[in-house]
Amino acid sequence: MKTTRSLLLCLLLLLPSLMNAAAQAPPSDDFLTGYVTAVLQRELTLPQTSFSVRVRDGIVTVELPGADSELQSRVWSALRGVRGISGLRVQATPPMQPLPTAEEPRGTSPATQTIPKGRAYPQGDVFRPLLADPKQPQFFVGMTRFHSSVPVDAFSRTITMASVSYGGTFGLYRRPTADGRGSYQIGLDGALFAQFNMGAPSHDLINADYMVGIPFTFRQGPFSMRVRLYHQSSHLGDEYLLRFHPKRVNLSYEAADLLLARDWGPFRGYVGGEYRVDKDPSTLKAGMAHWGLEYRGTRDLFDAARLVVGLDVKHDQQDAWNPSASLRVGLEFGSPSRDKRRLRVFLEGYDGRSPYGQFYQDKVDYFGVAVTFNF
């Protein structure tokens, strides 16, 4: 555990130098196009049909059909601090819809006409997935050196463990707010989280957690929110049961969780918690506090990837509110837009209460590498 804490501390000390390295390479025009588009959609919640972006030699031109001076000012303020932009033009062009005629009712305007209606099955989510949460629904594979407070393999407390997850969030319906500056969405999410002992003869499946939920998400400018109802149940692997005959725990519960987040340029902070009901075993405590910090780089390293850093901390009532921390530092490949596919390669470390259902009462720490695939 001391080793993992030292490694986590080293990673935190390295963050300034990593961020300086990220600032050295100038971003490409293609990257700036994607990043500016992501800022306008994510921070200002502008529909993609309400603007266009052109970038040439670092000079960014944003065209806003039918925009007023207030919207132009908001776009200018959101983009003027983006690193790598050598010039910025924000232009109000003729509206895509014709101006109202004398016969049309008062109050009708091009701005209201260009706000799209809600749509079914949207890509992505208006609340960005958490970078470092071990229980974030996503496609994930990792290899770690895992240490537990109790023996995991015969008399050994330390093993080489592979972790995988399969899942994600599927948007059902997204709709802009009445003023067109925000969006809310309802969806489904679910995932399978599994751990394997790579030192066992048949790479035993140790534990599998199944989760399914209904998230409601909202974004208005730099503020976002996720409210979710979900179910989790946990099961031991057959090979692990046959070899060690452990005492099985029938862990299962429903929970409601809430996260409130705010963006500051490339940084995001979030805070919230969850409350469990219908718990098995009944001795499982109900409450948990949850917070975290994230950094998403704004520049491509070698025109290929961006630096990303995530710290996720949970204080579970089951563990007397002691913190359990997950830290990931790595590179993200693909478009920065939340509606595009991305691949991330991480170094990761964890210290605290086990995030794996059957062993929820144990203290664990691990360090290793991981890859996530976001669709």
Image (cartoon, helix red, strand yellow):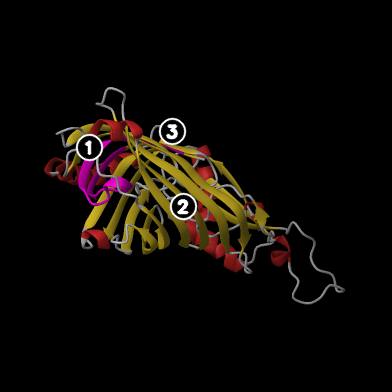
Tell me the mark number nearer the camera, choosing from 1 and 3: 1
**Three-letter code, disc 3:** Asp
Which mark is drawn over residue 322?
A: none
In the displayed orientation, state which residue is furthest to the bottom: 106
**Three-letter code, disc 2:** Arg
**Which of the 4 image quarters holds residue 21?**
top left
In the displayed orientation, state which residue is furthest to the top: 201
Q: Quadrant of the N terminus?
A: top left
**Span shown in magenta:** 347-373
Task: Answer few, some or many: residues within 10 Å of disc 3's Cα (few below 14, many 20 plus, some between 14 and 19).
Answer: some
Horizontal side of 85 relative to 345 (left or right) equals: right
Q: Earlier in the sequence, mark 3 or mark 2?
A: 2
- What residue lies at 26% left-to-right and 48% top-to-bottom? 354
Provide the residue designation for mark 2: 128
Question: Residue 227 appears at what percent x and percent y?
Answer: 47, 62
Q: CA distance from mark 1 to mark 3?
A: 34 Å
Q: Earlier in the sequence, mark 1 or mark 2?
A: 2
Secondary structure type for disc 1: strand
Question: Residue 16 appears at what percent x and percent y?
Answer: 25, 46
Question: Residue 33 appears at what percent x and percent y?
Answer: 54, 43
Secondary structure type for disc 2: loop
Secondary structure type for disc 3: loop
Instruction: Give the answer, above or below, for where 57 lies relative to 132.
Output: above
Provide the residue designation for mark 1: 146
Q: Earlier in the sequence, mark 1 or mark 3?
A: 1
Horizontal side of 29 relative to 103 (left or right) equals: left
Q: Are marks 1 and 2 in contact (CB under 8 Å)?
A: no
Does residue 202 appear in the picture of this structure? yes
For the residue pair 235 and 145, the one nearer the viewer reads as 235
**Three-letter code, disc 1:** Phe
Q: CA distance from mark 1 to mark 2?
A: 28 Å
Provide the residue designation for mark 3: 303
